[in-house]
Image: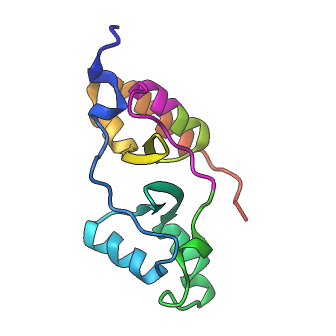
Amino acid sequence: MTNNNANKVQDIMTKNVATVSPNQTVQEAAQIMSQKNIGALPVVESGQVKGMITDRDITLRVTSQGKDPAAVKVSDVMTNQVVTGTPNMSVQDAANVMAQHQVRRLPIVENNQLQGIVALGDIATNSASNEAAEQALTNISEPSQPQG
């Protein structure tokens, strides 16, 4: 297989990424997710990825605990340790990182600035990496230990 640009993350990533800032409310994050029909948002401050917040984070850390989403800050419920990729990494490498860390979305960062995001679906629709996506999904779908 040749290592041409068709197998680079930059060619399949979403470039105009919806984001939320750490000091916005969970309600605002949920509204953005609803408007964009997405389930996760990178939490970005000054172009730098500070975390990720998912619809599941909101459900488990806010709604299920009876907290007011208009009063809770994104920074209080986001995942702080975010795995990222780079625009010039191969799609296979991105799939491997996603599988290893059990994530379905990989923010793409260059020079500490968010450049885009790759979702498992992006990798699956790139036929050259279909096998990589299948392997990543198999690993991600394995039950993991609950995080506290």
Prevalent SS, magenta region? loop
What x and y, as percent, mark residue 129? Answer: 35, 25
Using the image, determine if residue 113 lies above or below residue 54: above
Q: In the drawing, does residue 108 fall left or right of residue 58?
A: left
Quadrant location, the C terminus: bottom right
Using the image, determine if residue 95 lies above or below residue 105: above
Q: Is residue 90 magenta?
A: yes
Quarter residue 28 falls in: bottom left
Instruction: Name the residue: 50% across, 65% down.
Output: 53
What is the number of callouts on the image?
0
Quarter residue 11 falls in: top left
Instruction: Name the residue: 27% across, 26% down.
Output: 127
Instruction: Name the residue: 40% across, 63% down.
Output: 39
What x and y, as percent, mark residue 50? Answer: 55, 59
Instruction: Name the residue: 39% across, 27% down.
Output: 88
Quarter residue 110 falls in: top left
From which residue to which does the magenta span run? 81-96
Q: In the drawing, does residue 7 fall left or right of residue 42?
A: left
Using the image, determine if residue 127 lies above or below residue 58: above
Q: In the drawing, does residue 78 fall left or right of residue 34?
A: right
